[in-house]
Amino acid sequence: MLNITFDSESYYLDETPFFFYSGEIPYFRVPRRDWRFRLQKLKDAGANCVSTYIPWGFHEPQEGNISFEPDSQKDLDGFLQLCGEIGLFVVCRPGPHCYSELRFEGLPDWLSQDYPQIRAADFNGKPFRSSSISYLHPIFLKKAKKWYDAVLPILQKHTLSNGGTVAFIQLDNELGGTHEWIWGGYDYNPETIGLHEENGRYSRFLKSLYTDIGELNRHYGTDFADFSHVEYGKTNNPTTLYEARRYEDYLHFTFEMEAEYMETLAQWCGAYIDDCIFIHNSGTGVMNPHFLETARRLDKNFILGSDHYYNLGSHWPQNNPTPQFVSQCFLSMEMLRMMGFPPSIFEFPAGSIGSWPPITAKDMKCSAMSHLAFGMKGLNYYIFSGGPNPENMGSTVTEYDYSAPVGSKNQIRPHYAAVEAVGRYLAENRDLALSKRATDLKIAIDLEHVRSDYYKKNIGFGLGHKDLYQFLHLGLLCTTFCGSYSPELLSVHDTDTFSDLSVPLIVPSAAVMARSVQESLVAFLKKGGKLLILPMLPELDESLSPCTILRDYLGGGETRPISYDLPLLELIGFGPAVNSQGKLYETDLLPDGAERLGFDRITGKLTAWEKETENSGKAIWLGFHWNYCEEGQTRMLEFVLSRLGYDGYKAVECDNPNLWAVLRTTDSRAVVFVMNLFTEDMCGTVSLDLPKARESKAVTVPAMSVLTVEFPL
């Protein structure tokens, strides 16, 4: 029996590292006569896996009439049998939700129409959409359990332990998406949350957070008599700390409910199947941390991946893999790795809902190779091939062709060659499945910042977490990539993050920082660590209560944004002012023993200082929030790091800042991925500085492509 395992770096097939390489083929859309042809074209392109949704609404159009009729379009058993014959592992996605541009997200029409009480609700308990369902509503769970009881025996028949190829089961799809994307909030269905019930979910959750109702009232500024009387905050754009705390608690409650729902689905699956890996796809990279609670509940048999789309129509932010998009993808994959998962993109664009703007072979290959450079170990092309929607089930078109590599009439489109090229590269470079990315900078982040953009916006206390996330990927990360740095992202909640004193630690910070993290940073400095913290010194803890442990240790004062537009940062000893395209933060207090390092050229206000700490430690506060726009920002970062004793070492360097170079190493070789994410050919010189390889090579990288340069070790 084949056995698939994983860790935070790779997938393993019988202990041998391998790339998970898959394509989506919806059997319910592809005419049955074409199943074999489409699956074989996927296998021929180098794939080792196929993925498919299994829409509940397709198989149970009328309640109680579930059909998997043999030798028909609904013959799931026959499709899985064919996948095994061709030699493809299978990702089965039985929902209950599928999305996939299906009506009711693939749920049966009758479910919401006949049982309207199961719909997700807004702040006032009013359903905001007929197909957005309250996941833990007892009626929904009862109906969904019957669906799982019908479909799971078919999947169980084809698992690896039974000689089949079903290796992964996806639990639901893009959880939270139809709540967050539709109305910008979460589910407040009163029956699901048990509103005003002494033993309701919401009351139990609040009791787990607060020792008594008095403590809750102090945090909320309320006078509730007991936990069953607590009302949630009826805004997702809080303007006071009291409102923010209430919304923060409800958001965490939502993540716990979603984790409970995912655990319930996993338990249903476990009653039939015990040798499949459960997976889930977060709707976007920024949603990855929404599943911290799910990961804790499901533990070792669960993989979270993400969906990365650079083009889904004319409304999308970009049409091809721009540097801004790739930076965001890097951040997403680093978050997955930090959470313990091999970075995987379970929906990787191979087509689009519309034919314009087009998906091109060059764009698609460039995006895939950029992802590989930054650590991707698994991808699933969405979609590889499609066809006509089942009758009355499509929400966009009747012919779900999706401009896929293999068209709905079996036509082979130009970007099929990109799937082949990437598949061929993976086959010829199997050792890269266990490769490591060389790093030379350490950036410590808090995943809570990424997922808290709703309740920690600007609430009168400076930088909100949504802005901090933007600074991280458009400011700090783009600056490091253009400066040929290779940053490693670490968690501020991991004690190992603070064990290495040899290089500076960069910590992006808003006004909020957990008490334990502030304590860890103080301990790091006391041991002799070097810290760059920017752009704010924290003043609140995770519960939004006053907490200035780090600031008090350093002797710094309150930091606040300079109020006028386009301030100019000048660093003493650096040279000309630095363009920010963002904000400067100032303080009135220079800590005792600290040295003035930067100021706003217009007002003269203090915007940066440095201070020696115990055991030759040093901290620099830099009140600068920028979007990358010029090389002066890179030189500014180099200057500040040099003040912290950083020797400027770079594992790989390119003299053209518009070419991003990433170094991956194995036991025997070093491979540099040089990315040109622009529409003009670019030239440069790539230099390697490793103990076993010190060499430079001139390169010319065509527009919108990734060049690989190999150095033997």
Image (spheres, rainbow, N blue to C red):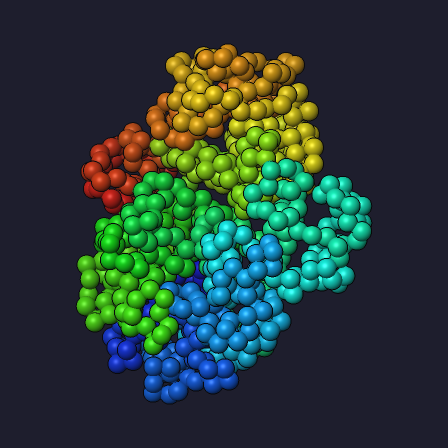
Numbered disc total: 0
Q: Position of residue 463 (x, y in %)?
A: 54, 32
Could you tell me which residue is drawn at 33 percent across and 54 percent down? 312
Foreground residue, 365 or 579? 579
Foreground residue, 681 or 44? 681
Residue 434, compared with residue 521, is above or below; it is below
Q: Position of residue 700 (x, y in %)?
A: 20, 38
The quarter of the picture where residue 221 lies is top right
The quarter of the picture where residue 256 lies is bottom right
Residue 638, compared with residue 495, is above or below; it is above
Q: Quadrant of the C terminus?
A: top left
Could you tell me which residue is drawn at 53 percent across and 28 percent down? 534
Horizontally, is 119 left or right of 29 in the view? right
Foreground residue, 398 or 490? 398
Q: Determine if residue 565 is in view.
A: yes
Could you tell me which residue is drawn at 46 percent across and 71 percent down? 107
Residue 228, compared with residue 412, is above or below; it is above
The quarter of the picture where residue 262 lies is bottom right
Q: Position of residue 557 (x, y in %)?
A: 64, 21
Q: Residue furthest bottom?
A: 70
Q: Position of residue 247 (x, y in %)?
A: 62, 47
Could you tell me which residue is drawn at 75 percent across and 55 percent down? 229
Residue 663, compared with residue 163, is above or below; it is above
Q: Determine if residue 167 is in view.
A: no
